[in-house]
Image (tube, rainbow, N blue to C red):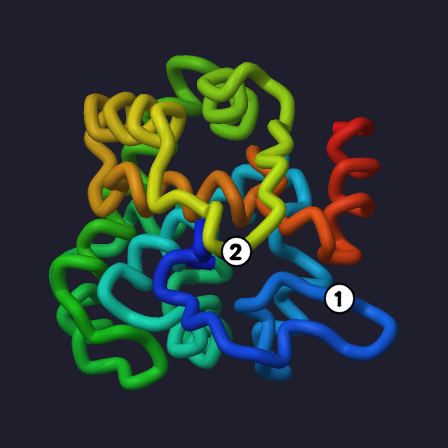
């Protein structure tokens, strides 16, 4: 994600981002990151639970590598009730205290608490505006954008659109949603196609985005 961004934030660029037949974005250099890159990153997401998952994971990644988060993804799925925002919104202090001791996730109290706060904020948006997916996509014009990046070095840390998304989410009480995290989120859920132009997934995602 450009956490799960941009240069997907926190994703270390290495050589080996391609195979002989399939050139890839440079950050996809390990088995886990290749699978994520090839199957998920940049695919337009319109499901509230999946969007909440990426908000949680992108927030958790701040200051860490995306590889670390991918390695703990199953732990997060277990710890956060399959990323069901209605269930997570009910987590109390004792539940949070237990999660701080859970080695299957990043044991950062602020990030754990932000997931609970964000679940409640998501439900508030849903109650006021309908599906979270419809609302959050409306903030970026409702359709994916093509970043048109030719090289990994062109990937920004944030954009005016991610800064605007960050401001609106913060206004509604979301936490760990700064402009860089929001851009990583936008990349991950397909609001922007930031596969580089030479990556085999760029055209595939562009075709998907045309149907979204």
Return the residue at label 1.
23
Residue 15 on image: x %, y %: 56, 79
Relative to 106, say whether 198 is above or below: above
Q: Residue at x 63, y 80 (%)?
A: 16
Residue at (24, 36) in percent of width and height: 174
Q: Compared to 1, does 21 lie above or below?
A: below
> Front-most of 73 and 205?
205
Occupied quadrant, residue 44: top right
Q: CA distance from mark 1 to mark 2?
A: 13 Å
Q: Nearer the viewer, residue 86 or 132?
A: 132
**Residue 101 appears anywhere in the view:** yes
Question: Residue at point 38% right, 14% down?
Answer: 128
- Counting from the top left corner in percent of width and height, residue 198 is at 73, 54
Task: Specify few, some or many for label 2: CA neighbours under 10 Å numbering under 14, 14-19, or 20 or more.
Answer: some
Determine if residue 5 is in view. no
Mark 1 vs mark 2: which is more N-terminal? 1
- Relative image position of residue 205 (x, y in whole percent): 75, 43
* Vertical position of residue 163 compared to residue 48: above or below: above
Q: Which mark is residue 152?
A: 2
Which residue ends up furthest to the right in the rendered image? 21
Count of labels in the image: 2
Q: Quadrant of the C terminus?
A: top right
Residue 149 in the image: above or below residue 63? above
Task: Kindly state the secondary structure of the residue where label 1 is placed.
Answer: loop
Q: Secondary structure at mark 2?
A: helix
Relative to the observer, which residue lies in front, 60 or 202? 202
Judged left or right of residue 14, residue 99 is left
Callout 1: few (<14), some (14-19), or many (20+) C-alpha neighbours within 10 Å?
some
Which of the 4 image quarters holds residue 23? bottom right
| Quarter holding residue 156 | top left
Which x, y percent locates residue 40?
66, 57
């Amino acid at each position: 994600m450009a956490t799960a961004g941009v240069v997907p934030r926190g994703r270390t660029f290495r050589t080996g981002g391609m195979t002989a037949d399939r050139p890839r974005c440079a950050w996809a250099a390990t088995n886990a990151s290749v699978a994520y890159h090839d199957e998920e990153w940049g695919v337009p997401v319109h499901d509230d639970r999946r969007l909440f998952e990426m908000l949680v994971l992108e927030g958790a990644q701040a200051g860490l590598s995306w590889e670390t988060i991918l390695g703990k993804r199953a732990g997060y799925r277990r710890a956060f009730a399959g990323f069901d925002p209605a269930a997570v919104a009910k987590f109390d202090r004792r539940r949070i205290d237990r999660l701080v001791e859970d080695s299957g996730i990043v044991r950062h109290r602020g990030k754990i608490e932000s997931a609970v706060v964000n679940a409640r904020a998501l439900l508030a948006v849903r109650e006021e505006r309908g599906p979270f997916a419809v609302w959050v996509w409306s903030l970026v014009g409702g359709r994916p954008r093509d970043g048109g990046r030719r090289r990994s070095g062109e990937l920004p840390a944030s954009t005016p659109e991610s800064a605007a998304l960050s401001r609106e989410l913060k206004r509604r009480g979301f936490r760990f949603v700064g402009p860089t995290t929001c851009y990583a989120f936008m990349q991950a859920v397909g609001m922007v196609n930031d596969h580089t132009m030479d990556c085999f997934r760029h055209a595939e995602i562009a075709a998907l985005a045309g149907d979204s």
